[in-house]
Amino acid sequence: MYLLNTNTRFLHDEIINYSQNILSTLPAELCVLTLVNSGSEANDLALVMAKHYGKSNNMVCMETAYHGHVTACLEVSPYKWNKFLTKPETVTVIDSPC
Ligand SMILES: Cc1ncc(COP(=O)(O)O)c(C=O)c1O
């Protein structure tokens, strides 16, 4: 941890070594690693990637979903909706599995 710099804007040999170590434990088709610092940031990035890949801003989430505390995550976290944060038109809510 002393040597690890997780800010990927400024490259450091140790983050590359660390990433290569992790990738060496994974199947070959999993060959890209993105390091983030929280669940919210991971989910925010996942939403960006899904929207780009799907060429759509539409999202589906479960009624009980929680995805984190950044704006993009709150938009797909129904229990966080209130008078300030309401359901976006691009979000469809489905029942949670029994
Ligand atoms: C399912 C789920 N997604 C996202 C988060 C947010 O993670 P973080 O607090 O690291 O931003 C949490 C945190 O409890 C979570 O349970």
Image: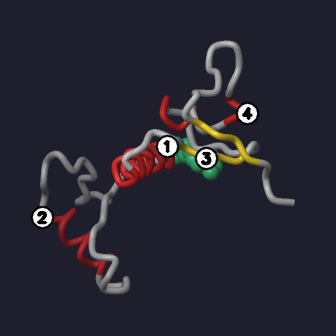
What amino acid does circle 2 point to? Asp
Label 1 lies in ligand 1 vicinity (Cβ under 8 Å): yes
Q: Nearer the viewer, residue 29 or 53?
A: 53
Of the image marks 4 and 3, the number of the one nearer the N terminus: 3
User: Is label 2 in contact with label 4 (beta carbons under 8 Å)?
Assistant: no
Of the image marks 1 and 2, the number of the one nearer the N terminus: 2
Q: CA gap, disc 4 to disc 3?
A: 14 Å
Q: CA gap, disc 2 to disc 4?
A: 42 Å
Q: Residues within 10 Å of mark 1 (few under 14, many from 20)?
A: some
Q: Nearer the viewer, residue 37 or 43?
A: 43
**Residue 80 image offset from top left, x and y in percent:** 68, 29
Q: CA gap, disc 1 to disc 2?
A: 26 Å
Instruction: Identify the mark at residue 13; answer none if there is no mark.
Output: 2
Of the image marks 3 and 1, the number of the one nearer the N terminus: 1
Instruction: Identify the mark at residue 40; answer none if there is no mark.
Output: 1
Describe residue 27's horizontal placement relative to residue 63 as left or right.
left
Label 2 lies in ligand 1 vicinity (Cβ under 8 Å): no
What amino acid does circle 3 point to? Val
Residue at coordinates 26% horizontally, 58% vertically from top-left?
4
Find disc 3 in the rendering and name its residue. Answer: 60
